[in-house]
Image (spheres, helix red, strand yellow):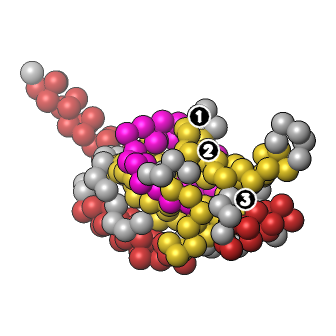
Amino acid sequence: MEKRTTPTEGLEIRSLVGDLHIESRDTGAAGRTIVGYAAKFECWSEPIMGWFRERIALGAFDGCDMQDVIMCFNHRDDAILARTTSGTLRLEVDDVGLRFAFEAPHTTVGNDMLELVRRGDVSKCSFRFGVKEDVWQYADARNGLDLDERTILRFLHVVDVSLVTFPAYPATEASVRHLEERKQEWLRKQTMQPSRFIPENERRLRFCDFLRIVNRG
């Protein structure tokens, strides 16, 4: 198992499907407030890039910098919908995960997002973040894992929360390469370390030597 407490290189993006909805007004009519979860605790992801899955530990957002986070469309800063610094984006960490809420602005992109979410054409959201601390369990013959497993223990910061068309990972390519390099480094260290396990025949020889020493005494 490998644990890192220093920030990993680059930013990463993770997506969540089916957590968007529009809050209704007290009158029962549909409002303009879009709410959802950008992340959920203790839920294993689908395989990422085909070789690992991950989960977010409860408390991972403790101490995370979320002072200036934007809500946008497809992670485009020219398609902004709300922002924490202006008070138009509300972020809340509860027992489920990172919850967001914002009122769709009366702009072209705001009106478009409101209609697309209402119709169900846009039903996915994601967030862009940096990691402060994580721990890995790499798959091998001893633990029987099919995929490497990563648990995010602490986030460093959240850059944006986004409504997305497709939950893809194109912006994480450089960061995933860094994660792969970390695994290769870990594997190299394992091969350089002397084995902690003594073969059965060697244990027998050592025991016989011990008996000879005792008998001589």
The quadrant in which the C terminus is found is: top left
Q: Residue 129 placed where, x, y %?
A: 45, 59
Mark 1 to mark 2 CA distance (whole Å): 7 Å
Mark 2 to mark 3 CA distance (whole Å): 14 Å
- Can you name the residue that lies furthest to the top here? 217
* Disc 2 + disc 3, Cβ < 8 Å: no
Q: Residue at x 55, y 38 (%)?
A: 93
Position above or below: 156 against 59:
below
Say which amino acid is labelled 1. Asp
- Look at the image and give the residue range highlighted in magenta: 43-71
Q: Nearer the viewer, residue 95 or 85?
A: 85
Name the residue carrying label 1. Answer: 94
Q: Residue 115 placed where, x, y %?
A: 81, 66
Q: Nearer the viewer, residue 188 or 181?
A: 181
Name the residue carrying label 2. Answer: 99
Q: Residue 56 placed where, x, y %?
A: 53, 46
